Image (cartoon, rainbow, N blue to C red):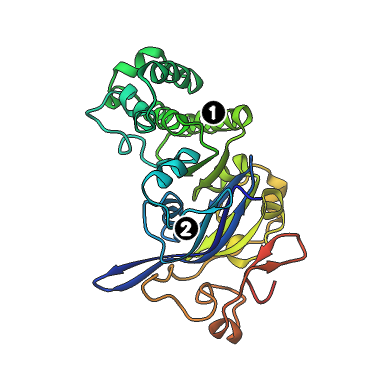
Amino acid sequence: MSLLALKDVRVHFNTAAGVVRAVSGVSLDLAVGETLGLVGESGCGKSTLGKAIMKLVPVAAGEIVVEGTNIAPLQGAALSEMRRKVQMIFQDPYGSLNPRSTVGRSISQPMVLAGWTQGAIDERLETLLGWVGLPSDARQRYPHEFSGGQRQRIGIARALALSPKLIICDEPVSALDVSVRAQVINLLEDLKSQFGVSYLFISHDLSVVEHIADRVAVMYLGTLVEVGARDQIWRNPQHPYTKALLAAAPIANPKLARARQRTVLQGELPSPLNPPAGCPFHSRCPIAQDRCKEERPVLRPVASGAQAACHFV
């Protein structure tokens, strides 16, 4: 049984200009102990999908199943119990912390809501700070006294407070310097090895995803266009959009860089207010044909062992 299973999940927002279809029928599984990278351009629906899993935004249709239970209808105590299993690390480490609360109070809040005793909270807080590499006196200080990397460590400690099984990492290192970014990624990997936690790692930075992910799901305009093992995606991408993303990313290995076929995207990302008919990528696709304008492709197995939503792979 999967730890997380998404079944035709849709997230729509009503605006004055019309209905924004931020997520349009995503189905995806995440296994116990796995890191699944979710990549795509800004505005493709990655973060919205992560927030939907946390029930921070409502789901218009579909199921979000955690350990066999559909969490979409959960409320009250049942929702609180679910959030012990699923936590989130946010993109902005400073914006996700209350500047008027001490670090200790911010990290302790999930434990307070769960009804822990003060003695148990103090003991756990000391342990959490040690895990993420912060001194014990950090609990008495405020977020503005820390660097960006330290603030993200505080966010990680808070996410770990109730020993979740799944952590949704929403662009957790995009606001950090390169050297600090590597430290935080290494910390996440160490915690995964130590506690067996699973990650849904959302990022537009393919170099980070290549380092941390076991599998990769590529998202475009609210839909998945390719899903596969990390090495397969990097060495033999199938969907034209995946090829374009990888072509734009720096490659450390010159041999692989020379061997990779260049695919240049044309035009702008269409608006989710008025998505194209047929394949959502056809207006920018270098191999699009008339069929693509009329018939929407679905994810299907391809020869490489991945799944791709394209009529011509």
How far is mark 2 from mark 1, CA to CA? 26 Å
Q: Name the spot of residue 281 as percent of width and height, x first.
A: 53, 72
**Most distant residue in the right direction:** 303
Q: Nearer the viewer, residue 57 or 136?
A: 57
Q: Residue at x 64, y 42 (%)?
A: 32
Q: Name the spot of residue 239 as percent of width and height, x first.
A: 63, 66
Q: Which class describes the residues within 10 Å of circle 1: few (<14), some (14-19), or many (20+)?
A: some
Q: Is residue 60 above or below residue 65?
A: below
| Left or right of residue 140: residue 8 | right
Q: Nearer the viewer, residue 43 or 153?
A: 153
The residue pinned by badge 1 equals 187
Which amino acid type is shown beneath numbered disc 1?
Answer: Leu
Q: Residue at x 66, y 50 (%)?
A: 1
- Number of numbered discs on residues: 2
The residue pinned by badge 2 equals 41
Q: Residue at x 30, y 69 (%)?
A: 14
Residue 136 visible in the picture: yes
SS class, disc 1: helix
Q: Find residue 289 and report its image quarter.
A: bottom right
